C-alpha cells in the first residue's frame, strides 16, 4: 500500500460532493476545509456548479490533472463506473465511502468482487466501501465524517467499524492521546487490516499500531506479518464477535476444545500481538507504548500518598502476576534516613502529609536508581489540602532527567486533578484514573517487552520417514477415506519417531497366542475392523490378558459376540498389543484452524480432559521452548512434575519433544486436518512415552 | 448511631478552627460556609478572636449551649481532654479529624483505646480519628476537606480512606451521580462500618449503600447485619488489601485452600453484598441501583445502531454468563414489518442509517413489551451524521412510560456525546461509555435480584448424639491436646450421623484376624499410635488384605518395623478396618475464619485437591440449597454426575447432606477450629458415602 498517497496526498477529488448537509460528500468536504487540508481539493458532481464555495467538475476527466486521492461518496450504482474512469485516468488511490453493498445483499457482494477485480487489473489501491474515511493529523488531512481531527501523535489506528473509530478518537481526545493516522477499512473489498499494519510498519510517524477487527480476511498471513512487525512496533488489537463465532463444527477432542477465543489468544501470543479487552484498555496501552520506554523486567516500584490506592495497586500487581520490586538495602536506608514523612519506606513507598513534593522527588529518584526496579508507578490521591501541583512538577522534573525506565502515574479523580493530569500528559507521562488500569497497562508493557527479548525461534527438524506417511495419506485421499485409524495411524506415528505399543493383527486364536508369547504378557486384544470406530461400545477391547487361555477366550468371545451386535460389519482380525506400562495419560493433538492453520494441543488425558478443559494451544511449527511453555501453561504440568513429596516427576522433556514431532508432521502434511494421540502414556523421567491410541482425520476435500 | 445528629445537626462547633488555610480546622469551616450550611456554626480556639468572620469561643463550655455536633481538628495531645469536656457538656456526636494516632505509633493506639472508653462510658458517638469528615448534600452539610458537596442523590457512602472518598465523589460528580450521605470513618476508634450500614439502612434518603474498606472490625457481625439489610437495600463494597492479607497460618488442607480472598467472596455472596472491583465499577453499579428497578431475570435485549458495539455487548453478555433474551415471534414479526431500516431484528436488534429515532422508539417499546425480556441495553455509537439527540429523546420518552424493567444506555465517547449522556442522566437512565461496563452492571443487578428472591433460609437440624462429642472435646481441652484423630474423630463423626468404616483396635495378630473374619475381607490395617500422625510415612497402612495370613503378616511386620523407625513412640495397637468399596474420593472440611467464623469446604479428593484447587467455600450454617449449590460450583460436580455416556451419577444428595451435618457439628461446637474428612468416599446413587479418614483440630486456647 502506497500510504503516502492516502495520508499525504497533494490533491484530492471528492466525487459526489453535495451541498446537502446530511450527505457524506458534504461532510467530508467540510472536514477537509475545516481542518485546513493544505493540498488541492477538487469536487465532482454533474448536477451542481459548486459545493461550499469550491467549483464542481462534471466528471473526473474534466479536472484536467490526476488527483493523488479520489474519494467516492456517490450512491452505490455509480461506483463501478467511477472506478473504471479512475483506471483510465491512472488514479492510484481511492477511498469508497459509499455504503449499502456487501452488508445488505447479494448484489452488493457481487459489486465488491468487481471492485476487487478492478483493483487487481488496474493497480488502483482501494479503501472501503462502507467506511467513514481516513485522517492524518500530521498532514492536516481529515477526509472523514468521524468528527474533527485528533491530536497529532504516534499511534497508527485502523478500524473495521466506523462508529468504533469515531468513539475511539473521541475518547482519545479527552485523554490528550494523539494519532499518526486513523483509517476505517470498512468492508475491505481490496485493502485490508494486513495492508494497514504493513503501511504503519513503514510509516515513520507511527510508533504504535492499534486496530479494531470483527473478521480476519487472511488470518494466517496477517499473523505471519504481525510477528515480523511486532519486533519493531507493538500491535494492539481488539477482536470482537469472538463468542458468537465459536459455533464451529467439532469432530475431535481438539476441535471441541479449541474454540475461537483460544485460537485468537494463542496466535496473538505467538505473534507478539497485544490483545485488548476494550477501547479504553487499548488506548491506555497505546498511550504508554507511545510515550514511555519498554520495561526491562517485571519488577514494579510503587510510590503513593498515604491512603487506599497504594494498597489497591499492590493488590492489582499480585493479581496480574507482576512483581512488587524488592528494593535494595541501600535504597531502603536512604529513604528511611532522608524521608521524614514516610509511612513505609519499603515497596509501596508511602508518603504522608499535605506538602509532599520533596518526598516524592526523593523517593522517585531513589527507586529509579535501584537496579532491582524496572518500572515505577507513582500514585497520588489528593484531598483538598494536598499540594498536588508541586508533586506533579517534581515527578516531571525527575522524569525528564531519567528516561531509561518507564514511569506511569495514577491520580484517581476527574475535575480536581484535571490540571495535574494535563501537566503529566504534556510531559509524556501517561496518567490513569484508577490503579487497576495503570497496572493492567504495565502488564501489557512487560509481556510485550518479554516477547521482544525472547531468543530467536529455531524449529528443530527430526529425521523421519516422510515417504511412508505420504503413501498412506495418498491412498486414503484416492479412496476418499478421511479417517486414518488403527495400524495405519500407528505406522504414521512410528515414521515420525513415536513409540507405539508392539502389536499385530491376528486372524485366529492360535496366531494371537503365538504373538502374545512373543511380546510377553500381559497383552491387550482390540477388535480390528474398518467399520467399527468405537471399539469399547461393542465389547471390542479386552485389557490385561495374562496367559494363553485368557487370550484365546477373549479372541473367541469377540468373534462370537461382535457380529451379533454389528451383523453387517466385516471383522478381518483382532489386534494383539503389549499392555502399556502404567503412567500418566495425556493427550497430544492438532486442529487446523480455518484462519490460522495448525494449532497444536496438549492436555490432561482420560475423562478429565472434558471436565477440566485444562488444555494449551499454540500454533505450529513449535520451537522446543514453545513446546515446553505449552506444558507449563497447564495445571496438568503440576500433576506431571509431582508436587507431592517423594514422587518423582515424569518425562516432561519427552512430551515436549513429542509435541514438536506432531508439529513437524502436521506442518509437512497440510492434508491432515485433525490429529489426536489419546492416550499418550508418559512414564518416569528417562523412559520413553507410548502413543497408545490415535486418530488422524484428513481433508478429503 | 444517631445519624440525624451527624447528618442533619442544628448546630456545629469546630474545635481548633484556624485562620491558617493549610489547617483542617480552616478547611472544614470554609466548606461549611461555602456550601451554605443552614444551621448554627460555633468556632472554638483560645488563641484567636475570630475565624473567617465567625467569632471564636475560648472553649466549648463558653458557647453557652450544647452543639448537636462537635468537630475536633486540634493536634492529637488535646483530643482526650476535649472529649472529656464533651462528656461533661453532654454532647452526643463528635467527629475527630485529627490524625497521627494509631496509624503512626503505639502511643496513638493507646489514645484510641481511651477514645473508645470515653465513648462507652459517656454515650458520645464518635467518628474518626484520622478522617476527612462527612457530607450530607440533602441537608447542605459539608463538614469535610474532601472538596465541595456532591450532588444530592440516593447513595449512602462510607470509606475507610479519606483520599479514596475524595476521589470517589470527584468521579461521581463527573458522571452526575449523587449521594445521600458521605462519611470517612477513618481509624474507627468508636463508630465503624457496621454502624454506617445500620444508619444507612434506617435513613430514608438512602436507597443504595456503598463502602470502601481495608479492614473489618467485626466481620461476623457485619456480615449478619449486612444479610438483613441487603434484603431491603443493596450493599456495594470494595475490599482492598486482600492479597497481602492472604499470608495466614495454615495447618490443614482447608486452611491452605481458604485464602482471604475466597473467604470474602463467600461471605459476601451469602450476605447478598455486591463486591466491587474498583471505584468506577462501584459507582456504575450504585448508579444503576439508585435509578432503575431491579430486573426480574437474566434475559437482556440489546438495541444498537449498526456497528461494533452491539457485537461487543453480545460478547460481554456471553462472557458474564447472562442471557441474550430470545425475542418472541410476535416481537420479531412486528420489528421486521415495521422497522424498515433494521440490519437485524433478532437480538441484538440493529438499526441502520443516520436518522434513527423512530426505529429506536419502536424497537424499545417492542422489546420492553416482550415477556421474555428482563432488561434492555440501548447502545448508540454515533458518527458525525447520526441524529443522536433524537434517539436519546425517544429513549427517554419510552422510559418515562414503561418503568417496570431496567433500561441502561451506552454511548461510547466523551465530548461528542456529552449532551446526550447528560440528557439520559437527568432522565434517570444510567449511561455508560463502554458496552462491557454496562454489561458488568447488569450482571450485578441480576445477581442481587436473584439473591433477593431466593427462598427463606431453613437450616435442617439432624438428630445427633451431642453429649458424646462434648465428652471427647472436653477431655482433649482438659489435656491440652488440639488434634482429635483415629477412633475418637470417628466417634465424633458417627455421633453426627456419618458412616465410618467398621473397625477396632487389635493388640495381637490373632485379635486382628478374629475381627477381620467377623467384618469380612478385604480389610485394611493401620498403625494406631498417638505419636504417629502420618501413618503412610512409617509404613503404617496396609490395604487390601484378603485373608488370615495376610492380616497376620501385616500386623507383625508393622510391629517389627515401625519401632525401628520411631524408637520412642508407644504403639498400643493396630486398627483393623473393613476395606471401603470403590468410589469417588472427595473432601469435606471446615476452617474457622478469624473474621467470619466457620467456612464449610467441599472439593476434589486425592492429590488433585492441591493441584486443581477446585474447591467451594460457604459460611456455616448451611441450608440444603446452599450445600447443593456448593457442589454445583465445582468442576468436581461434573465428574461426580458423570458427563460421560453410560456412567451413572454418584450420590450427590448424600454429599449435600454430609456438608449440612459438618455445618451442624461445627456450629454446635465452636471449639472446633478445623475439620477435614479426607477421603470421603462416595458411591453410586442410593448408596451411603463413607468417611474413611478425618482430622479435627480444636482451639485449645
Image (spheres, coloured by chain):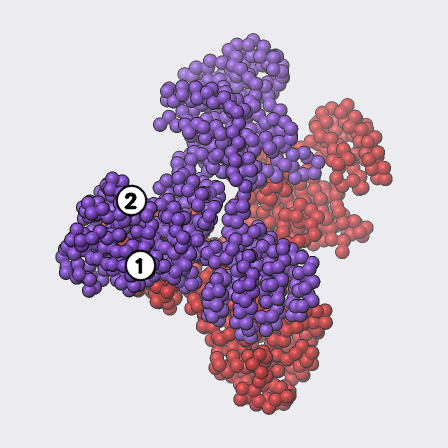
Chain colours: A purple, B red
**Residue B517 drawn above or below residue B615:** above
Residue farthest to the right? B568
**Residue A526 drawn above or below residue B449:** above
**Quadrant that contains the C terminus of chain B:** bottom right
Residue B617 rendering spot, x and y as whole percentages: 60, 49
Mark before the other along the chain sequence, 1 or 2: 1
- Viewer-nearest residue: B104 or A512: B104
Q: Residue at x 36, y 51 (%)?
A: A159
Q: Which mark is residue A142?
A: 1
User: Which quadrant of the figure has residue A646?
Assistant: top right
Q: Is residue B143 visible in this depiction of the protein?
A: yes
User: Which quadrant of the figure has residue A119?
Assistant: top left
Q: Is residue B362 visible in this depiction of the protein?
A: no
Q: Chain of mark 2?
A: A
User: Are dots 1 and 2 in contact, CB under 8 Å?
Assistant: no
Residue A442 rendering spot, x and y as whole percentages: 53, 54
Disc 2, SS: loop
Residue A692 rendering spot, x and y as whole percentages: 55, 24
- How far is the residue under mark 1 from the one under mark 2? 22 Å
Residue A501 rendering spot, x and y as whole percentages: 56, 21
Q: Residue at x 66, y 49 (%)?
A: B255
- Viewer-nearest residue: A572 or A242: A242
Q: Residue at x 59, y 14 (%)?
A: A516
Labels 1, 2: front one? 1
Q: Residue at x 32, y 45 (%)?
A: A191
Q: Chain of mark 1?
A: A
Disc 1, SS: strand
**Residue B139 drawn above or below residue B693:** below
Share a chain, discs 1 and 2?
yes
Q: Which mark is residue A189?
A: 2
Amino acid at each position: 500500500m502506497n500510504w503516502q498517497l492516502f495520508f499525504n496526498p497533494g490533491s484530492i477529488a471528492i466525487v459526489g460532493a453535495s451541498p446537502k448537509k446530511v450527505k457524506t460528500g458534504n461532510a467530508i468536504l467540510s472536514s477537509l476545509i475545516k481542518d485546513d487540508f493544505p493540498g488541492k481539493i477538487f469536487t465532482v458532481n454533474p448536477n451542481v456548479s459548486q459545493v461550499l464555495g469550491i467549483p464542481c467538475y462534471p466528471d473526473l476527466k474534466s479536472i484536467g490533472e490526476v488527483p493523488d486521492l479520489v474519494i467516492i461518496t456517490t450512491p452505490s450504482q455509480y461506483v463501478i463506473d467511477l472506478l473504471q474512469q479512475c483506471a483510465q485516468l491512472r488514479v492510484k488511490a481511492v477511498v469508497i465511502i459509499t455504503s449499502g453493498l456487501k452488508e445488505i445483499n447479494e448484489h452488493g457482494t457481487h459489486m465488491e468482487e468487481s471492485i476487487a477485480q478492478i483493483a487487481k487489473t488496474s493497480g488502483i489501491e482501494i479503501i472501503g466501501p462502507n467506511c467513514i474515511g481516513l485522517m492524518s493529523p500530521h498532514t492536516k488531512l481529515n477526509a472523514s465524517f468521524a468528527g474533527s481531527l485528533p491530536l497529532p501523535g504516534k499511534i497508527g489506528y485502523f478500524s473495521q467499524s466506523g462508529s468504533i473509530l469515531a468513539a475511539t478518537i473521541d475518547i482519545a481526545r479527552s485523554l490528550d492521546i494523539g494519532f499518526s493516522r486513523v483509517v476505517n477499512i470498512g468492508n475491505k473489498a481490496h485493502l485490508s487490516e494486513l495492508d494497514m499494519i504493513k503501511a504503519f510498519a513503514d510509516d515513520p510517524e507511527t510508533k504504535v499500531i492499534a486496530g479494531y477487527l470483527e473478521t480476519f480476511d487472511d488470518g494466517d498471513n496477517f499473523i505471519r506479518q504481525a510477528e515480523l512487525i511486532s519486533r519493531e512496533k507493538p500491535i494492539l488489537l481488539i477482536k470482537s464477535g469472538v463468542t458468537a463465532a465459536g459455533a464451529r463444527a467439532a469432530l475431535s477432542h481438539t476441535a471441541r476444545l479449541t474454540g475461537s477465543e483460544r485460537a485468537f489468544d494463542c496466535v496473538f501470543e505467538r505473534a507478539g500481538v497485544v490483545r485488548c479487552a476494550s477501547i479504553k484498555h487499548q488506548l491506555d496501552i497505546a498511550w504508554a507504548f507511545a510515550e514511555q520506554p519498554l520495561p526491562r523486567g517485571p519488577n514494579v516500584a510503587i510510590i503513593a500518598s498515604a491512603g487506599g490506592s497504594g494498597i489497591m495497586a499492590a493488590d492489582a500487581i499480585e493479581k496480574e502476576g507482576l512483581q512488587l520490586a524488592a528494593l535494595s538495602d541501600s535504597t531502603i536506608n536512604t529513604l528511611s534516613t532522608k524521608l521524614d514523612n514516610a509511612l513505609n519506606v519499603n515497596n509501596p513507598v508511602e508518603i504522608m502529609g499535605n506538602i509532599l513534593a520533596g518526598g516524592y522527588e526523593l523517593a522517585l529518584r531513589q527507586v529509579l536508581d535501584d537496579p532491582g526496579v524496572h518500572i515505577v508507578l507513582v500514585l497520588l490521591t489528593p484531598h483538598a489540602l494536598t499540594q498536588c501541583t508541586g508533586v506533579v512538577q517534581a515527578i516531571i522534573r525527575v522524569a525528564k532527567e531519567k528516561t531509561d525506565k518507564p514511569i506511569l502515574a495514577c491520580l484517581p479523580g476527574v475535575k480536581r486533578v484535571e490540571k495535574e493530569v494535563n501537566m503529566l500528559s504534556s510531559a509524556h507521562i501517561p496518567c490513569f484514573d484508577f490503579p487497576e488500569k495503570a497496572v493492567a497497562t504495565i502488564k501489557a508493557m512487560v509481556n510485550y517487552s518479554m516477547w521482544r527479548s525472547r531468543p530467536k525461534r529455531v524449529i528443530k527438524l527430526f529425521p523421519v520417514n516422510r515417504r511412508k506417511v505420504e503413501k498412506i495419506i495418498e491412498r486414503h485421499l484416492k479412496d476418499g477415506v478421511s479417517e486414518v485409524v488403527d495400524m495405519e495411524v500407528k505406522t504414521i506415528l512410528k515414521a515420525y519417531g513415536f513409540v507405539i505399543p508392539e502389536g499385530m493383527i491376528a486372524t485366529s486364536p492360535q496366531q494371537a497366542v503365538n504373538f502374545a508369547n512373543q511380546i510377553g504378557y500381559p497383552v491387550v486384544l482390540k477388535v480390528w475392523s474398518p467399520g467399527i470406530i468405537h471399539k469399547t461400545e461393542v465389547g471390542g477391547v479386552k485389557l490385561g490378558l495374562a496367559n494363553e487361555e485368557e487370550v484365546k477366550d477373549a479372541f473367541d468371545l469377540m468373534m462370537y459376540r461382535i457380529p451379533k451386535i454389528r451383523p453387517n460389519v466385516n471383522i478381518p482380525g483382532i489386534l494383539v498389543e503389549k499392555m502399556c506400562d502404567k503412567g500418566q495419560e495425556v493427550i497430544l493433538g492438532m486442529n487446523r484452524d480455518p484462519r490460522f492453520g495448525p494449532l497444536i494441543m496438549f492436555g490432561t488425558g482420560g475423562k478429565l480432559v472434558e471436565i477440566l478443559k485444562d488444555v494449551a494451544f499454540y500454533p505450529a511449527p513449535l520451537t522446543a521452548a514453545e513446546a515446553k511453555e505449552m506444558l507449563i501453561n497447564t495445571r496438568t504440568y503440576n500433576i506431571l512434575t509431582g508436587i507431592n513429596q517423594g514422587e518423582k516427576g515424569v518425562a516432561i522433556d519427552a512430551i515436549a519433544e513429542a509435541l514438536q514431532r506432531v508439529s513437524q508432521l502436521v506442518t509437512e502434511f497440510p492434508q491432515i486436518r485433525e490429529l489426536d494421540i489419546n492416550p499418550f502414556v508418559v512414564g518416569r523421567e528417562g523412559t520413553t512415552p507410548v502413543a497408545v491410541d490415535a486418530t488422524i482425520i484428513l481433508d478429503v476435500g
